[in-house]
Image (spheres, helix red, strand yellow):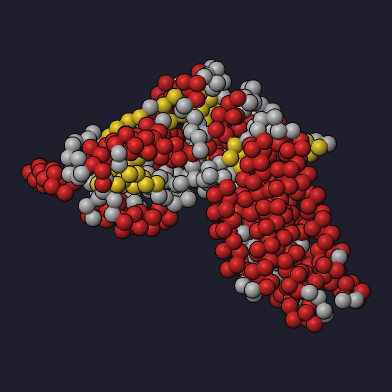
Amino acid sequence: MTNTDMSKTKGASFVKSLLNAWSWLFLVIILGFFEIYAQTQTGNTFLFRIYNIQSISVAASQILLLALGLTLVIVAGHIDLSIAFTTGFAAVAMALVIRFVGPEAGWFTVIIAMGVGLLAAITVGLVNGWLVAQLNVPSFIGTLGTYGIARGAALIVAGGATVSIRSDEARVLGNGHILGIPIPVVAAVVLAVICHYVLTHTRFGVHTYALGASRASVERAGVDVKRHLVYLFVISAITAGVGGLIYTSRFSAGAANAGEPILLYAVAAVFIGGASLTGGQGTIIGTVIGAFIIAVIQFGLVFCGLPPYWQFVAVGLVIIVAVLVDQSKGRLVGGST
Amino acid sequence: MRNFIKSTLLAATLSVSSMAHAQEDITITLIPGLTTDAFYITMNRGAQAAAKALGITVDFQGAEEFDPVLQTPVLDAVIGRGPDAILIAPTDTTQMIEPLRRAHDAGIAVITVDTFIDDGKYQDGLGDADFPYSYVASDNVGGGRMAAQFMAAEIGGKGKVYVSNVRPGISTTDQREEGFKAEMAENFPGVEVLDTQYNENDASLAASQFQAVYARHSDIAGVFGANLFSALGAGNGVESANKADEITVIAFDAPTSIVNNISSGLVDAAIAQHPAEIGYFGVMAAYAVLTGNSVPTTIGTGFTVINAENVDDENIAKYIYSE
């Protein structure tokens, strides 16, 4: 890979981000819709209330933590379904350590517990990487297998139930603020910035996009593709694992199913954000917008008092629109990506 | 009517001839709604206590999620092993009827615990599923009413409240909501019950739903969480709004995570069922059937309200569901 390749990819990603403008536009439209609704029906603002923005951001960050690493995996042309229970495994592992130490567990214990939770997550990532890279198992199948294994492991170590904890430190971590920003949001922003940097400003990112486009060419360029795949699945496991740590801290309970209902929203966020099932496309910014679109819809429809099942319909419609836009991209610009 | 008498007589004859067993080789399988819930784990403890007292064997086998698609294969495997009786918490009122009929046809006595099939009224000659011998559970409608009474007292009989629930179609959580709403409508006209929010067991979504309801109705007075994740999420939403002192959160069920939140003030009260009693009396009812005795077609177990005042009382502690 040379500098010319690098700048070419940058140019392509600029074109792509222009094309992805529809998701910005969509987010603005739904925010505008809810703002107008709020102004006319309640006489209040929807968007310009710190409380609403904080609530939506926290909901989006829980989706985003699963979606960030997943974006990298999908860009490389793979998928990681195991994150649903990587999250739960990390959540349960963290809760168990805190419970083992007891009610006087201080910051030191909480930090150790988070380390253990992350290690549990990384283990799942390593197994995924090994299956996909070394054994050439298709990632959809391989991670479906580890989806089950991580779920079972989480339930086994938790003794089948939700592991409740009593720790003021963990509670602060899940529900506190830094400079007025909820800590779960801070965690998601930090990881999003790192993932964005990795994907757009490093050789690793260039290789990830290239891997999604053509594995053979990346191999010809002398990149250790197997090792690269392992790294990708470990990154995916880490962001999902952080999601689990946040979950345990927010709810003072480690639940094996913490990430399960969120998996589909995370996958949806990545695709709404402009990624393609065939790989080679997708950006962290797009995924962030995708997660916000879902969180805004979920929050806004409840705010409007619409019957709850419209949430599912709305998120489903957005996914279909996203895929349609994705397909028309190629026709519009003649496959510039 | 004549048919009914005939079939009852036939059933009685059958139960005498085929169901009288020597006590020590009686085996019963308890199939919970899901194996990963402190409620059912506590129920199993009650069942094991009864098994020990009777000198019989009770197995615990189930799926890890509350879902008829997952419960049916477990049930089929259990039927294949052929216990004398099955105690089951059916995961759907209609979808589990045919799978359970297979158990009945194989000569296995069926008793439902916690949840029911069909209309929940068995052995009366009416309905599609008349074959289970008994339904052992807490009266969830009554529990919902109890939650409403407690809520109304906490909020002074007026204000806006809503139910945070899992999804429709689950007999128990539907009944809790039904009881809660009925009690409010009948006895507390000053309380306005807003639309129910369904969270699919996602505490994070339940929290965000509370925040959205609060954004719209800043005068919200209380939330009734119909199960663990609904209450955990609603409690978290209340905390994020810094309204733990003003907004009443009542939880149905009392696993340790809810009880911890009572101690910390996030949840104001929990309506605790007595799952160990359900397990205990379920096994006793099955044993009675298998030894040729009659059983009531419904057996109701009790509730206890746990709040900040009694949470540390040891007489109350036994009602906390524990792993």
Name the residue nearer the viewer: A234 or B115.
A234
If the image is split into quadrants, where does the N terminus of chain B sit?
A: top left
Q: Quadrant of residue B58?
A: top left
Residue lying at 71% horizontally and 33% vertically, measured from the top left? A105
Tell me: residue B294, above or below residue A64: above
Which residue extends farthest right?
A: A3
Tell me: residue B289, above or below residue A195: above
Residue lying at 31% horizontally and 56% vertically, measured from the top left? B81
Q: Is residue B136 visible?
A: no
- Is residue A126 left or right of A308 when viewed as pictured? right
Q: Is residue A102 visible?
A: yes
Q: Quadrant of residue B111?
A: top left
Name the residue nearer the viewer: B141 or A320.
B141
Q: Quadrant of residue A79?
A: bottom right
x%, y% of residue B186? 40, 24
Residue lying at 48% horizontally and 50% vertically, measured from the top left? B64
- Is residue B43 left or right of A168 when viewed as pictured? left
Tell me: residue A182, above or below residue B263: below
x%, y% of residue A298? 62, 46
x%, y% of residue B7? 12, 46
Total count of labels: 0
Residue lying at 31% horizontally and 58% vertically, measured from the top left? B80
x%, y% of residue B315? 47, 20
